[in-house]
Amino acid sequence: MHLIAEVLDAQLKDVNGRNSGRIDGIVLELRNDKPPRVAYVEISPITLLARFSERFAWWYATFDRRLGPGRGTPFRIAWSRITRSGPTLRMDLDVESTSIMALEDWLRDRVVSHIPGN
Amino acid sequence: MIANEVHVELLLGRRVHDVDGRAVGRIEELHVEIIDSESVVTEYHLGSAALVERMAEFVRQLPFFKRLPGMRSEYRVRWKDLDLSDPRHPRLRVPRSALRRGPIEGPA
Amino acid sequence: MPKPLEITLGIVTSVGGFLEIGSITTAAQAGAGFGYQLAWSVLLGTVCIAFLVEMSGRFSAVSKHTIPDAMRERFGVNFFAVPLFVMLGVSLLVLAAELGGVAAALQLATGISIPVWAVPVGFIAWGVLWRAPFSLIENGVSLLGLVTIAFAVAAVKSHPSYIGVAHGLLPTLPHRDSAHYWFIAVSVLGASITPSLYYFYSSGAIEEKWDSSYIGTNRAIAAIGMGFGGFLSLAVLVVAAHVYPRGSSIDHYQQLPALLSSLLHRTGFWLFVAALGIACIGATIEIALSLAYLVAQGFGWNWGENLQPHVDARFSLTYTVLIAIASLLVLCGLDPIKLTNISMALTAASLPIGVFPFLILMNDSSYLGEHTNGHFGNAVVLGISVIAALLAIVSIPLEILGG
């Protein structure tokens, strides 16, 4: 498997087939005398922004903390919970049980729900 | 958070130097295999040709591909030959001349 | 729906949805300034967009990816950010020009000035996106847009020299005003080859759940629909060549109704107002949706015009914000004609940034299997995009320097 071509920036779906963002980052565990292990993937605007600028990532993390408890750090999921289904990557979780949709939920609750016809 | 971790997306595009300080190429791809039920990195692909391989595989099929500038530049580096203790400045543990061009058979 | 009916509907909506303020204004300027001499730029633009629309439909039907989705996946976010921001910037100007076009039509009809209409028009466009399903947006407004066939009627009534028009389809060098000639040519190309159109088409193919069995349908819609649409653009050029004194320039939208009123009299005036208003509201809705698709698909959000806004809040708020910004630009009093000229020229200049990565994807068998591009299609699209961009880079500064 080619990690960058096939995993990084790929679309992630949850156990119900719902879009759950993209793989913004991949975390390797470095070990003595053993090859690096693919440990986690990250789905987060903080991780995405860090690829451009650490300052942008820091600013976003500051805003992200306001979205709820435990926010302000990238969401990680263990690589063992990811499977490949054709070109799509799936996690064995319901996206609603994660913090991936925190911004979407916040916008829905604070903005969209107040607009008629939503 | 794990004790000794490295972010792949921040390694991408990093220039690698060998033990003699000579530039070898940029990290463009990581090859992963499943060994003992774990997904592990077995080799790193460096150089312009590796970038093209990742983005536009069909270009490599063109008859004049190898004549394009930089397209002969591709190194496959075994996992043990790359020191990632400083992820911003990855270094080879061997000289560039010890590297092989083209695919390496089997895991290291 | 049976395939023949789908093809017919697709062609009809392509024709009805082809003209908008960019193609109307630039074709009129071409005809007014240079007679039939710039007909080749309409032909070139039409051929290129027909190829691009066919490619984008084929890509989505076979790969089940949209173009932005595949661009992020294949090239990574660091590269994807370039076409993302360029398209957002340029297309936002086009969006404002279209919204301004609707406001201009209302100003012509009522006498009430353009800035007053900026917010109501933006609200109507937003309301359609907020409430209507995709099929109504794609088909409804475009069917109404068939009123633009009035330009074809006017072109026939102008008794053009068909041999002269045929000569104009071959590129020639200008006899005078070289900088202006090439600038208008570039603007016509930019008006025809709008990335938001084929990006929208790609997303539409996914919204309508196309698969490989739609390849033939897609080809027919792209070729015939875009072809007839280009014919309407050519009709505007032919009418303008007849109506306006040779060498004149169109600097104010109040000059445009003469395209139809001079040949169809009072009925022509109202037909023009209806054509401009409907064509531009359709384009406003389509561009806003296209940009929302681009952002949502690039970042992996939930998206879909058939979803309720509360299900895809980020997607819905993206087009809301874009329409608000475009309304603000029109509210500030930016002239629709100037905005159109600038945005069309910038579209042409930035074409390679959107087209090159798309062509790479169209040659990638991991997405398209056996349905990758042939050499001819690659050559046509690549060639026209490069020519358009080079002409834009040269002619825009000359036009600015020439005042």
Image (spheres, coloured by chain):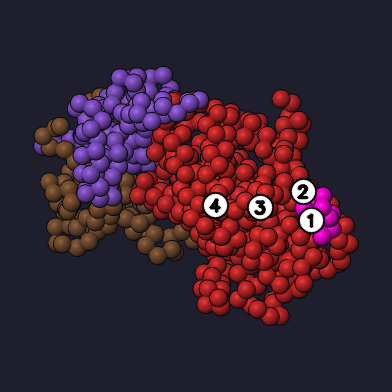
Chain colours: A purple, B brown, C red
Q: Earlier in the sequence, mark 3 or mark 1?
A: 3
Q: Earlier in the sequence, mark 2 or mark 1?
A: 1
Horizontal side, residue C311 vs residue C32: left or right? left
The answer to whether A36 appears left or right of C176 in the picture is left
Residue B10: tell me if it is visible. Answer: no
User: What is the CA distance from the residue labelled 3 to the residue labelled 4?
Assistant: 12 Å
* Residue ID at (41%, 19%): A16
Identified at 82% across, 50% down, the residue is C267
Asked if marks 3 and 4 fall on the same chain, the answer is: yes
> What is the magenta segment's predominant secondary structure?
helix
Residue C260 numbered mark, or none: 1
Which is in the foreground here, disc 4 or disc 1? 4
Which amino acid does the dot numbered 2 rest on?
Leu
Label 1 neighbourhood size at 10 Å, few (<14), some (14-19), many (20+)? Answer: many
- Residue that mark 3 sits on: C111
Residue linked to disc 2: C271
Highlighted magenta segment, given as a residue range: C261-271
